[in-house]
Each structure stands twice: as structure tokens, then as C-alpha cells.
Image (tube, grey):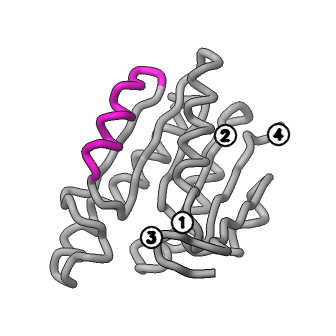
Amino acid sequence: MDKGTVHIYYGTGKGKTTAAIGQAIKTASEGKTAFVIQFLKERKEDEIGFLKRLEPEVKLFRFQKSVLSYGDLSDEEQADENQNLRNGLNFAKKVLVTEECDVLVLDEVLGLLRYGIVTAEELRQVIEARDENTTVILTGSDGVEELWDLADEVTELVTRKSAVDNTI
């Protein structure tokens, strides 16, 4: 039995979340459902508000309690958030096992490995819980090459020029 597809969007460039959310919206336009679980991200009410308007076709979940990005938290605050983030990953596995959606976006999930919150093996077990019809999309700055064998598509986004920070 074939498994659902897995896409990884990673890199230092902008657009990883946008690409993943775009896939979720495309799924919703086809009359299907998509879940987006965000990890390690700052709570931006304008973005969250927009995604909330897409419910029930696109549902957004955040388990992190802080409004700040994980990287901006103190060591003590990060330690407090680690269980919340692990709960988010456990929820993702439950969603896949119970086949609750057609597309599951795990936004910035690859960063959980960088921070040592979960291991590559734990993330692999979540991905392997998908059924033959579910697409899983993972995003993050890090490539996490040890997961590439599970992926049907790996896309690296790299900024070559930016008017915002004057880089070329």
C-alpha cells in the first residue's frame, strides 16, 4: 500500500510557510480539509486571524503558549514550552492515525530537532503514521537530511537578494 505524499520545505529564505499554507488552501478549494500545526513561531494575530477565517476547511493549531518566537525566549521559558511543543507533535500523530484531514502542515516542525525538543526518529514515527491518502508538509530552516528518504519532494528556499535587509 502506497503512503500519502510528504513534502519538505526548508532553507534560510522566506516562503516556506507561505508555500505550505498555499497547499492547505488548494486542498480546501478542492472540498477537502487541511490542518496546520505551528511550532516555534511568534503569534502574529493578523496571520492567525486570516487562517481562522478559512475554518472549517483549514484549521490552525498552536500548542505553544508564549506569543514570542521560541528562539526569543529565555532558557527557562523554553523549558516550559518544550512539553507544549511535544504535545503539538503528539496531536499531529493522532490526527494522522485517525485520518482527520487530507493535508497536515507541520509548520516549523524541523526546528524541534535543532532545539533538541524531539529526535529525528520521533518525527519519523509521526510521518510514518500517515495513511495512503494524507499529505504531510514539513517546514523549517534546517534540511534534516535524515528524513529525506520519507519525502516525495524536498524544496530548499534560499534568498539570493533581499530589498529588506540589503543582501545579494
Split into 4 quadrants, where in the image is the C terminus?
bottom right
In this view, 13 is above or below 67: below
4 or 2: mark nearer the eye: 2
Which residue is identified by label 4?
2
Which residue is identified by label 3?
112
Q: Name the mark on residue 135.
A: 2
For the residues labelled 1 and 3, the Cα–Cα distance comes to 9 Å
Q: Earlier in the sequence, mark 4 or mark 2?
A: 4
Q: Is residue 56 magenta?
A: yes
At label 3, which amino acid type do we have?
A: Leu
Q: Which residues, given as a range, are shown in magenta?
A: 44-57
Q: Earlier in the sequence, mark 2 or mark 3?
A: 3
Split into 4 quadrants, where in the image is the N terminus?
top right
- Marks 3/4 in contact by CB < 8 Å: the verdict is no
At label 2, which amino acid type do we have?
A: Thr
Q: Which is more toward the observer, 66 or 92? A: 66
The x, y position of residue 140, in whole percent, is 54, 65
